[in-house]
Image (tube, rainbow, N blue to C red):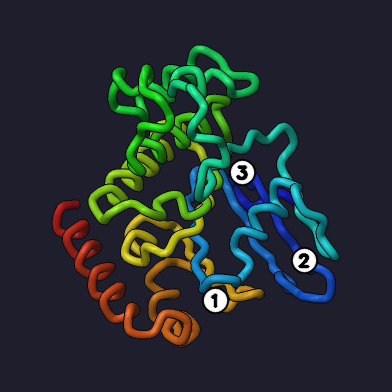
Amino acid sequence: MLKSGNNIMLIEIQNLNVAYGRKKVLENVTLTLSKNEIVTIVGPNGSGKTTLFKAIIGSIPIKSGSVVIKQNLKIGYVPQVLNIDRSLPLTVERFLKLAKNRNDQGFLRAQQILDSDDLLSSQISNLSAGQLQRVLLGHALMNEPDVLLLDEATRGLDQPGSAAFYKKIEEIRETTGCAILMISHDLHVVMSASNRVICLNGHICCQGEPKSVAASPEYASMFGSKVEGTLALYHHNHSHEGKGS
């Protein structure tokens, strides 16, 4: 296990089944994540996307199957929301320094993600949605992770804010080699930024390169009228990439 040709496999999930009581949430889910990959999971609400993340980090029991993590793998996690009392007098700098096993290099990387030294002295409670997501991303990078898990990290951001956030994600992958597994509803971003897309609805409906997934009937049935626009944008982006290469 954890061997994939010349790729360095970081996470390998085989035939994963998770249930809450009698309710099956994930059935026979099999997927892998290798170094330097960006893999995006899409699916409707209640499809088991967040449950899959919880199974990976070991915060919920699994019914059967296996989740194999590369030895000494470091995982950074960016949640949908920050579960902290935002009324507490807590600055961004103090919040970042609460990260376990942090080092100077990790703190420097977090500062670069913030794009502004002024943010360090700001109160968490006063941050905009976009600023808060950059802080959470910086916090996740403090321990120089091998894998970043992003659970709908752009929820609540407008389109320019989402685009800026995902640009940061691609920069992180390019500069660090960090693999990224993310849940997203931003279909146009999924198609332009991902190496692979996985459609999840309790089980894996389809998966593969963005172009093949976007053209699949399973994807069309899941997202309906959004697919045509997503496909058009995907082809537009990649036709321009081809002209510029």
Q: Amino acid at mark 3?
A: Ile
Q: Earlier in the sequence, mark 2 or mark 1?
A: 2
Q: Earlier in the sequence, mark 3 or mark 1?
A: 3
Q: Is residue 112 left or right of residue 146?
A: left
**Amino acid of disc 2:** Val
- Reading the image, the residue beneath label 3 is 8
Q: Residues within 10 Å of mark 3 (few under 14, many from 20)?
A: some
Amino acid of disc 1: Cys
Q: Give the label, 3 or 1, closer to the camera.
A: 1
Q: To which residue does mark 1 refer? A: 206
Instruction: Kindly indicate the quadrant of the structure image that contains residue 159.
Output: bottom left
For the residues marked 2 and 1, what is the alpha-carbon distance in whole angstroms?
19 Å
Residue sitting nearer the eye, 205 or 92: 92
Tell me, for residue 18, which label it has, or none: 2
Which of the 4 image quarters holds residue 241? bottom left
Q: 5 and 128: which one is in front?
A: 128
- Looking at the picture, how far across and down is residue 27, in whole percent? 73, 73
Identified at 39% across, 80% down, the residue is 215
Which labelled disc corresponds to residue 25? none
Residue at x 72% of width, y 54% of height = 55
- The percent coordinates of residue 44 (x first, y second) are 51, 73
The answer to whether 119 is drawn above or below residue 155 in the figure is above
Q: Residues within 10 Å of mark 2 (few under 14, many from 20)?
A: many
Image marks 2 and 1: residues in contact by CB distance under 8 Å: no
Q: Is residue 147 left or right of residue 40?
A: right
Kindly check if marks 3 and 1 are in contact, taking CB atoms under 8 A apart as contact: no
Q: CA distance from mark 3 to mark 1?
A: 23 Å
